[in-house]
Image: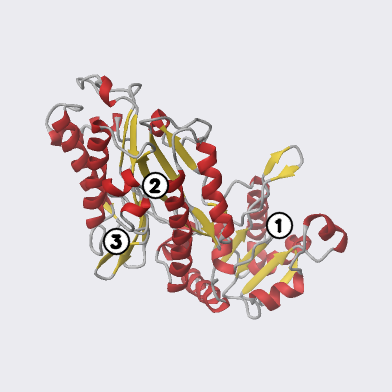
Amino acid sequence: MSISLEEYQQRRQTLMEKIGQGTAIFRSAPLAVMHNDVEYPFRQDSDFYYLSGFDEEEAVLVLAPHHEQHQFILFVQPKNVEKETWTGYRIGVEAAKKEFGADEAYPIEELDEKLPDYLKQADCIYYHFGRDEAFNNKVLNHWRKLIAQFPKRGTAPSAIADTNFILHPLRQVKSDQELSLIRHAVDIATEAHNQALTIAKPGKYEYEIQAEIEYIFSKHGAKSPAYPTIVASGKNACILHYIDNNKQLEENDLLLIDAGCCYQYYNSDITRTFPVSGKFTPEQKTIYELVLEAQLKAIDEVKPGNTYNQFHDKAVRVLVEGLVDLGILQGNVDEIIEQEEYKSYYMHRTGHWLGLDVHDVGGYKVGEDHWQTLQPGQVLTVEPGLYLSPNAKLAEGQPELPQRWHGIGVRIEDDVLVTRDGNEVLSAGVPKSVEAMENGISANQGS
């Protein structure tokens, strides 16, 4: 299960059609240091991978549609027996052409020598200035030299434009091959969540649940967790990105698990919240049902033609109306929403794009005042929540949080595909009904 060479070629062709007489440059991801001289496992830059499938560091990808001989060029690490003994096998220059379809490939050491040949006839250089300042400066220096030669040569790229504005809209709509990989990542995470639901009991530690989840990820070939796994019990569930995962589960705790995996570079992202003792307290059940109602109604708003903000707005309204009914918030619902007074207990938006990146690329707005219209092939998360921390900063005029609500944190998150006639909840295999959350997965499979 992988993206075909033909699809990578089509992606490059589509981008080259958009840049016309320009030249696009993409830099591989840098190596990240864990501590001293120990590096994190390498993870390729998503744009670089999207266009090539090439998964090595110290590489540069160039697209030059105007060049007479070479339109797709790779600069890569050459084969080196001594270095490969220490750090692993390399594709090498010749195989980069054969296995990845490059028109030409060079050793990365020849970049400064060869790159000008692909820039000098371009009318624009397309490049995203990232966190690699040395490489940013390299691109700028090449551009400056070409500009300086303009009076004599009569040609030079007149500008540098950001590739993000052209490439990222292409990444937003997923192909059938991409959707197959996302579905598989979701299926793996589904099994992991369902296993967690059956084993989480008072006395276990959060890290034990995390270990079981990530074991299932690895067992099925996932490259890694999609993000640090969140296993948050009790009041820890009120911390949005809690990753300490070191508390012992106690009677009457809620357990919030936010976990997804990365399979062939594509990601899943699922959250469930359930009582570790097998029964919600009345207050927990009230908040859980409110969040679930908000999520179900938000998912109903995910369909072609609706704008991106509609499912968020629906979730916010359901949550605010519920909090007002409970007396946790006071005042007019519309005014509370307009003044964002609900953000004491619901401080994030209801979803994000999902794909090669967990928070995938692509704009949410078109201009300052217009939200993007949803279209088939987009994948996003729908994840409302409530975090009733006694430490929350309250909006002026809002009441103190009564003791009985203290420390209740609930989030419910699904991965949703926009289809031609509505949506498909890809993560529907993880239960979320009250009955299933109280009695374990066997009580209500697929609820």
Residue at 26% in and 23% down? 404
Task: Report the residue marked by disc 2.
Answer: 271
Pointer 2 or 1: first along the chain: 1
Observer-side mark, 3 or 2, equals 2
How far apart are labels 2 and 1 at the CA level? 36 Å
Q: Image check: 405 left or right of 266?
A: left
With 343 as the anchor, is 260 left or right in this view? right
Q: Secondary structure at mark 2?
A: strand
**Structural distance between the alpha carbons of marks 3 and 2:** 23 Å
- Residue tagged by mark 1? 58
Residue at image x 54%, y 68%? 22
Res 25 seen here? yes
Identity of the residue furthest to the left in this view: 332
Density class for disc 3 (Cα within 10 Å; few <14, some 14-19, many ≥20) is many
Give x and y (percent) for residue 262: 53, 56
Q: Residues within 10 Å of mark 2 (few under 14, many from 20)?
A: many
Q: Of marks 1 and 3, which one's residue comes earlier in the chain? A: 1
For badge 2, the amino acid type reads Thr
- Disc 1 residue type (three-letter): Glu
